[in-house]
Image (cartoon, rainbow, N blue to C red):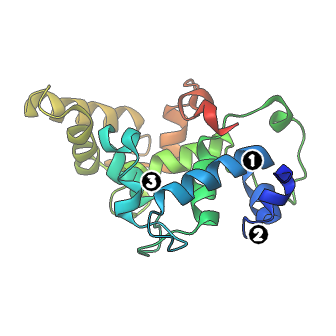
Amino acid sequence: MGSRSSHAAGIPDVDSIRRDTGFSQACLLRLHHRFRTLDRNNKGYLSRIDLQQIGALAVNPLGDRIIDSFFPDGSHRVDFSGFARVLAHFRPIEEEDTGIRDPKQPEPLNSRMNKLRFAFRLYDLDGDGRISRQEMLQVLRLMVGVQVTEEQLESIADRTVQEADEDGDGAVSFLEFAKSLEKMNIEQKMSIRILK
């Protein structure tokens, strides 16, 4: 049996991934093991079908949208680096993450603003930087299924967009989205404890 660091040497570009994601070496080893488990054919990358094997995503009403986030440029494969970088959005914020950081360094992937950007993209179905009433309605349909009538869904979508839409353009921009969620503990709601 080798040391943990010798196992980490098997992860391509591990130092860069650790720096970019904030994951500990131990967490990266666990994620890499999970990645290899999902990559049943040892291709070195994951496809949508591979990610659909994750039970939590299969039952999540936004599972397909979350899976889409692994393939931002229309690619059909994600390597370990991309896999870890998407999951970093769900890494809990630790005490050491909240201190003063160098403004020349990029904002951590698990920062409040990056978590909000990630959530915003789940709603912004066409990627135009705005959440329209129609997009809100589509996402609500995914989330609640047949438990709510279409009329109720339309009412919720109208009210949600209307309350967040400060400039009256009929859609929610990222800044409006972020402001509407300023009292929500997004840091906790978008964290997965196993990603420490």
Q: How crowded is mark 1: few (under 14 residues within 10 Å), some or many (20 or more)?
A: many
Question: Does any portion of residue 105 appear in the rendered image?
Answer: yes
Q: SS at mark 2?
A: loop
At a point 34% along the width and 38% down the height, the residue shown is: 60
Query: Mark 1: which amino acid?
Result: Phe
* Mark number, residue 23: 1
Query: Mark 3: which amino acid?
Result: Arg
- Say which of 67 and 174 sits in front: 67
Asked whether disc 2 touches disc 3, contact meaning CB atoms under 8 Å apart, the reply is: no
Query: Mark 2: which amino acid?
Result: Asp
* Mark number, residue 121: 3
Distance Cα–Cα, label 2 vs label 3:
27 Å
Q: Residues within 10 Å of mark 2 (few under 14, many from 20)?
A: few
Q: Is residue 44 above or below residue 17?
A: below
| Figure label count | 3
At a point 76% along the width and 69% down the height, the residue shown is: 13
Q: Label 2: which residue?
A: 13
Q: SS at mark 3?
A: helix
Residue depth check, mark 1 versus mark 3: number of the one nearer the observer: 1
Distance Cα–Cα, label 2 vs label 1:
13 Å
Image side of residue 183 versus residue 12, left or right: left
Residue depth check, mark 2 versus mark 3: number of the one nearer the observer: 2
Asked whether disc 1 touches disc 3, contact meaning CB atoms under 8 Å apart, the reply is: no
Ranked by sequence position, the earlier of labels 2 and 1 is 2
